[in-house]
Amino acid sequence: MGAERASAPTPCPPELVRPWAAGEYDGLLRTLILGHKERQQFSLRRPLGELLARAVAGLAGTAGVVTGSPLVLVPVPSQRARVRARGHDPTLLVTRVAARELRRIGHRAEAASLLHVGRVLDQSELDAAGRAANLAGSMWVRGRGLERLAATTGRAWVVVCDDVLTTGATAAEAQRALRACGLGVLGAATIAATRKRLPGGARAGAEPRTDAPTS
């Protein structure tokens, strides 16, 4: 844990912008993520949020974003039925902890629950192409969330946040939805990434890039 790094999967969705993870989805880190998400071990929220904050900070530093620049952390949304079944929204709550941790170390960070998602199939048995097809067009941003963001935050860098990066399909769909309403995306930050990635986090045929900060 704590070996934050670029984490592009392979194959990588062509639209995926600069993914970054705090560690590998294996061993203890996998146990912690599943314990918090599926077993309501809420005491794990703080350490997981701190790991996510390190991923965001690593992403921002590599992209040349200076400490003190506004960061808006947007959690990947969960379906309402799944939140009800679990009794909590793990990604949202960990993202809020990450924003607090980033503020503690000098960043101007806030968590903004901008994204919503419609009904999609369980992704666990789907391959990369299946996940991309399953999620295509499933997410959107409501105007009220944008209004709140505009009222409270000026020019800012937007980061998509999730617990695990696997094929990149979820992060890519989140980025598409944010861009569709005019928000630029710095990249995606996750607590962990699976081993399905290129050595060193390189991305075949493309250089990591970012959108301009959101005005």
Image (cartoon, rainbow, N blue to C red):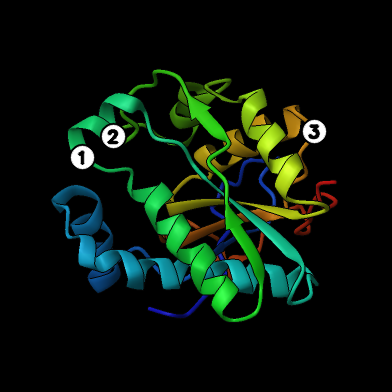
Q: Amino acid at mark 3?
A: Gly
Q: Which residue is mark 3?
A: 182
Q: Are marks 1 and 2 in contact (CB under 8 Å)?
A: yes
- The extreme front residue here reads 151
Q: Quadrant of the N terminus?
A: bottom left
Could you tell me which secondary element the residue under label 2 belongs to? Answer: helix
Nearest to N terminus: mark 1 or mark 3? 1
Between residue 130 and residue 154, name the one nearer to us. Answer: 154
Can residue 54 be seen in the rendering of this structure? no
Q: Amino acid at mark 2?
A: Val
Left or right? Give the position of 143 relative to 34: right
Distance from Cα at disc 1 to Cα at disc 2: 6 Å
Q: Residue at x 62, y 72 (%)?
A: 57
Left or right? Give the position of 69 relative to 136: right
Could you tell me which secondary element the residue under label 1 belongs to? Answer: loop
Q: Are marks 3 and 2 in contact (CB under 8 Å)?
A: no
Does residue 83 sit above or below 31 in this rendering? above
Mark in front: 1 vs 3: 1
Distance from Cα at disc 3 to Cα at disc 2: 28 Å
Q: Which residue is mark 1?
A: 87
Q: Residue at x 34, y 22 (%)?
A: 121
Q: Which residue is mark 2?
A: 83
Does residue 193 sit above or below 37 in this rendering? below
Q: Amino acid at mark 1?
A: Gly
